[in-house]
Image: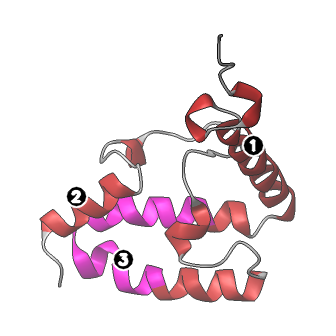
Amino acid sequence: MPDSDFWLTLITKLRLEPNEASKPKTGRCVDIGKNYYRILQVSEDADLQVISAAYRALAKRHHPDVVGPLGADYMTLLNEAHSVLTNPALRATYDKQRDHSKDLKEDTPDNNNERFAKVATP
């Protein structure tokens, strides 16, 4: 069984603060700051059966009854990812927001985009 440092590291890498899991969820919005595909370890074009199978396997392995209290935070994250990716409307919204976010990141000066190229002065 993994130790508590493993779980803290995993939760930090997945951008979930330990106390965030206990916060009530209001509305049915999606958080593009979290990569639900990465959390469930599936590809972006995975179908519902693959997503559900991955969820069940991860939930079985990381359930709080198996790994302890820190598993509750990870299970909350798994449940959130599963609920978004198995709901066609939420998944479409999530994918659209992720694509838009990727487009914005590509249009930054740090990415050497031609639109932001510096003009040499004579």
- Does residue 9 appear in this view? yes
Q: CA distance from mark 3 to mark 1?
A: 36 Å
Residue drawn at x 71%, y 66% is 85
The secondary structure type at the circle numbered 1 is helix
Q: How is the image coloured?
A: secondary structure
Q: CA distance from mark 1 to mark 2?
A: 31 Å
The quadrant in which the C terminus is found is top right
What span is colored magenta in the figure? Answer: 58-81
The quadrant in which the N terminus is found is bottom left
Left or right: 108 as drawn, with respect to 69: right
Badge 1: residue crowd in 10 Å (few <14, some 14–19, many ≥20): few
Q: Nearer the viewer, mark 1 or mark 2?
A: 1
Q: Which residue is mark 2?
A: 8
Instruction: Give coordinates of residue 75: x percent, y percent.
Output: 43, 66
Q: Is residue 8 magenta?
A: no
Q: Which residue is mark 3?
A: 63
Q: Nearer the viewer, mark 3 or mark 2?
A: 2
- Does residue 69 appear in this view? no
Instruction: Give coordinates of residue 9: x percent, y percent.
Output: 24, 60
Q: Which residue is mark 1?
A: 103
Residue type indicated by callout 1: Asp
The answer to whether 8 is drawn above or below residue 29 in the figure is below
Which residue of the protein is positioned furthest toward the front in this rendering? Answer: 122
Badge 2: residue crowd in 10 Å (few <14, some 14–19, many ≥20): some
Residue drawn at x 65%, y 22% is 118
- Label 1 vs 2, first from the N-terminus: 2
The secondary structure type at the circle numbered 3 is loop
The answer to whether 47 is drawn above or below residue 32 in the figure is below
Which residue of the protein is positioned furthest toward the top in this rendering? Answer: 122
Residue 66: quadrant of the picture: bottom left
Residue type indicated by callout 2: Leu
- Label 3 vs 1, first from the N-terminus: 3
